[in-house]
Image (cartoon, rainbow, N blue to C red):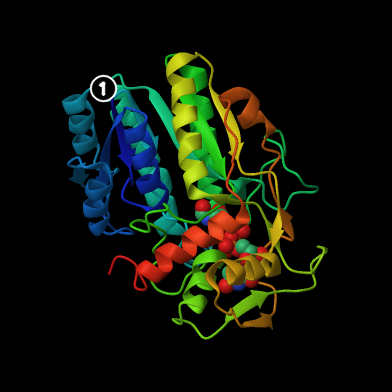
């Protein structure tokens, strides 16, 4: 059996990747402190796989525990999802983000090094591109940050570069997610933000299901076709498949890589709202509001490198993303609570 450690594996991306790894014949092991996820996910994953879920409740910062876990299962690789990811919160509480996202990465890498487990996929983000001069964005674009959350992703990438330069035994894949949305078609797992959703799709879904009265559209004076922000929304099932392809590449080749995981197609806020209304049959009332600080006008990927290097590309449409997000939301109006 080939065991793969998923730090933060009970989270939104982690739980969908769990299923994709299981389907690919690998055995995922979750490490999660449930600070931003729910143990209910474990029951859902067991229902979907028909197998008991291997999960340890704990923090990636607990080096001794991580080391023991890696040794117990002789992990083939680690996928590092665990981290805080709310842009606004990172501005208000930068130390919380530096301690958790940077401290957790250092601790994990030390535990991996100490147990000779040096194959890692890192969950990075398109936020490292800051405000791109042009679109679509390739992996060669300059990096920058506009908030402490994005800063931690950029620094984590730099840590990994330095580590690989110091020891060629490391096999590292950096995956820069664009905007993950949607849910597993079963409706049993999905995105479950705590409190007021920061991100567009879960907020739209909550308006459609009647939990919120309307959507605030942050800015309609951007240099985009309809004036609202344009992003590269990628179905979380495509993202999960991208992780399996990236892991298989790491295990079969001797090169490290950094790839965009996006569709290469940008959609505006209003296009997403319209697609969601069509998919759900529900109205999504909108109110135009001032721009949100830190937002950029356009951000979408040139996804060609992931295709050429990993033989992977996103296949699901915006309609699929909205239909699956709606199915999850309508089956679980209060998420996992
Ligand atoms: C998308 C568009 C908003 C909410 C962030 C992080 C990124 C990743 C994904 C973690 C923008 C508009 C949004 C709302 C709106 N997070 N919007 N009303 O900002 O592109 O990316 O989340 O990995 O790292 O930076 O995603 O979904 O917040 O916003 O009008 O209530 O929707 O202005 O144009 P974003 P988002």
Q: Position of residue 5 (x, y in %)?
A: 30, 34
Q: Nearer the viewer, residue 281 or 295?
A: 281
Q: Position of residue 23 (x, y in %)?
A: 35, 34
Q: Nearer the viewer, residue 97 or 204?
A: 204
Q: Nearer the viewer, residue 296 or 12?
A: 12
Q: Residue 286 vs residue 94: left or right?
A: right
At label 1, counting other C-alpha atoms closer than 10 Å, the crowd grade (few under 14, some 14-19, many 20 or more) is some
Query: Which quadrant of the view contains residue 248?
Result: top left
Residue under label 1: 115
**Above-or-below relation of 236 to 304:** below
- Quarter of the figure that contains the N terminus: top left
Give me the residue at 61% from left, 51% from top: 317
Give me the residue at 41% from left, 63% from top: 328
Q: Is mark 1 within 8 Å of ligand 1?
A: no
Total residue callouts? 1
Q: Residue 232 vs residue 192: left or right?
A: right
Give me the residue at 19% from left, 35% from top: 64
Res 199 visible: no
Res 277 visible: yes
- Secondary structure beneath dot 1 equals loop
Q: Position of residue 18 (x, y in %)?
A: 34, 41
**Above-or-below relation of 229 to 101:** below
- Quarter of the figure that contains the C terminus: bottom left
Give me the residue at 61% from left, 31% from top: 306
**Above-or-below relation of 271 to 117:** below
Q: Residue 97 vs residue 256: left or right?
A: left
Q: Position of residue 89 (x, y in %)?
A: 47, 66
Q: Residue furthest bottom?
A: 213
Ligand 1: quadrant of the figure: bottom right
């Amino acid at each position: 059996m080939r065991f793969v450690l998923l730090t933060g594996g009970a989270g939104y991306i982690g739980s969908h990747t769990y299923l994709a790894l299981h389907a690919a014949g690998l055995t995922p092991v979750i490490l999660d402190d449930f600070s931003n996820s729910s143990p209910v996910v474990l029951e859902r994953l067991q229902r979907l796989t028909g197998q008991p879920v291997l999960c340890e409740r704990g923090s990636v910062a607990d080096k001794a525990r991580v080391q023991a876990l890696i040794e117990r299962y002789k992990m083939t690789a680690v996928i590092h999802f665990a981290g805080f990811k709310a842009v606004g919160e990172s501005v208000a509480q930068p130390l919380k983000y530096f301690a958790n996202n940077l401290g957790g990465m250092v601790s994990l890498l030390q535990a991996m090094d100490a147990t000779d487990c040096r194959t890692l996929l890192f969950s990075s983000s398109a936020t490292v591109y800051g405000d791109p001069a042009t679109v679509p964005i390739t992996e060669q674009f300059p990096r920058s940050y506009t908030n402490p959350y994005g800063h931690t992703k950029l620094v984590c990438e730099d840590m990994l570069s330095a580590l690989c330069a110091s020891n060629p035994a490391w096999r590292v894949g950096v995956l820069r997610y664009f905007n993950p949305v949607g849910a597993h078609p079963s409706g049993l797992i999905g995105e479950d933000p705590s409190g007021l959703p920061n991100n567009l799709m879960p907020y739209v879904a909550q308006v459609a299901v009647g939990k919120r009265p309307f959507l605030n559209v942050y800015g309609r004076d951007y240099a985009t076709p309809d004036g609202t922000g344009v992003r590269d929304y990628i179905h979380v099932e495509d993202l999960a498949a991208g992780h399996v392809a990236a892991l298989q590449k790491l295990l079969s080749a001797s090169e490290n890589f950094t790839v965009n995981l996006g569709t290469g197609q940008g959609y505006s806020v209003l296009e997403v709202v319209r697609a969601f209304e069509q998919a759900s049959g529900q109205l999504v009332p909108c109110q135009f509001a001032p721009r949100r600080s830190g937002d950029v006008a356009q951000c979408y990927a040139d996804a060609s490198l992931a295709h050429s290097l990993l033989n992977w590309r996103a296949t699901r449409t915006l309609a699929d993303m909205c239909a699956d997000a709606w199915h999850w939301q309508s089956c679980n109006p209060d998420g996992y609570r």
